Amino acid sequence: MKQRVFAISDIHGCYDRFREMVEQHIVLSKSDKLILLGDYIDRGTNSKEVIDYIIALQKSGYDVIPLMGNHEAMLLDALADPSGVTLWFVNGGHKTMQSFGISRLIEFDPYYIDFFRNLNYYYAVENFLFVHAGFNDSIEDPFSDRRSMLWESRQEYQHPLLKGKTIIHGHQTIKLSSLIDSIDKHARVINIDTGCVYAHPEEYGRLTAFEINSFSIVSI
């Protein structure tokens, strides 16, 4: 039986739903692969629990591949340069500080900072590419532009290294109906961020997992 490969994006501190998805809906086994497309922190209330759960899954022998999101990058930028703190806070960084029980960035446990710094920017499985946002379609090596991988999403790609690949990403919240349409069309670029951290409007507020072999989704 072929290995199941799931992708989940933009958890944003929604720990309860993330754990429910992993344990009750996709029922992750150690023979599966789970690729996480970044943005584990900020905006939601349980960022620390999300990170702790990811690390616990890895330590327990589950094949979990967490990638870098722009929110993790904003946290690292704020740590490196105080001028970046405002941007991070505007985007929900204060919620992450509360979740980790700290009032100053310097209080962050280095254990977690190392986790963030060691995140990869993209991942490939067969004919699929997984990334937080997208790729720079206009340069010789699209895998060298980290900023584009965190911030820039496109609906199609013409680059020889990208054309013909199926690119799975998050970053920009879409309606579940739009995602279902992409799945039905077997689109080459599929956004799976259905806005789990947003309660309103009604079209959002869902966490979605995509499985590459069945080309299907689970959304809660």
Image: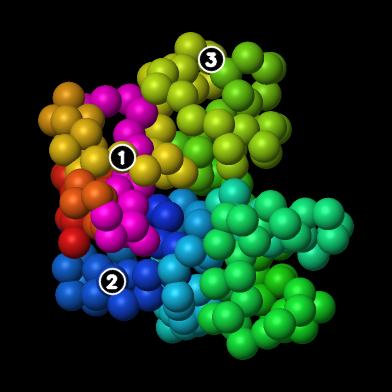
2 and 3 marks in contact (CB < 8 Å): no
Labels 1, 2: front one: 1
Which region of the structure is painted magenta? 186-200
Residue found at the far left of this picture: 184
Q: Earlier in the sequence, mark 1 or mark 3?
A: 3
- Please report the residue visible at 72 percent of the width from the left and 71 percent of the height from the top: 114
As drawn, 156 above or below 9: above
Q: Nearer the viewer, mark 1 or mark 3?
A: 1
Q: What residue is shown at x 45% (from left), y 75% (from top)?
A: 45
**Where residue 134 sits: x, y (%)?**
51, 33
- Residue 167, x across and y down, in percent: 40, 33
Q: Earlier in the sequence, mark 2 or mark 3?
A: 2
- What label sits on residue 126 in the rendered view? none
Q: Nearer the viewer, mark 2 or mark 3?
A: 2
The verdict on residue 194 being magenta is: yes
Q: Secondary structure at mark 1?
A: loop
Instruction: Name the quadrant containing residue 186.
Output: top left
Identity of the residue drawn at 16% across and 38% down = 177
Give the labeled residue for mark 2: 17
Q: Which quadrant, please, contains the N terminus?
A: bottom left
**In which quadrant is the C terminus drawn?**
bottom left
Which sits earlier in the primary sequence, circle 1 or circle 2? 2
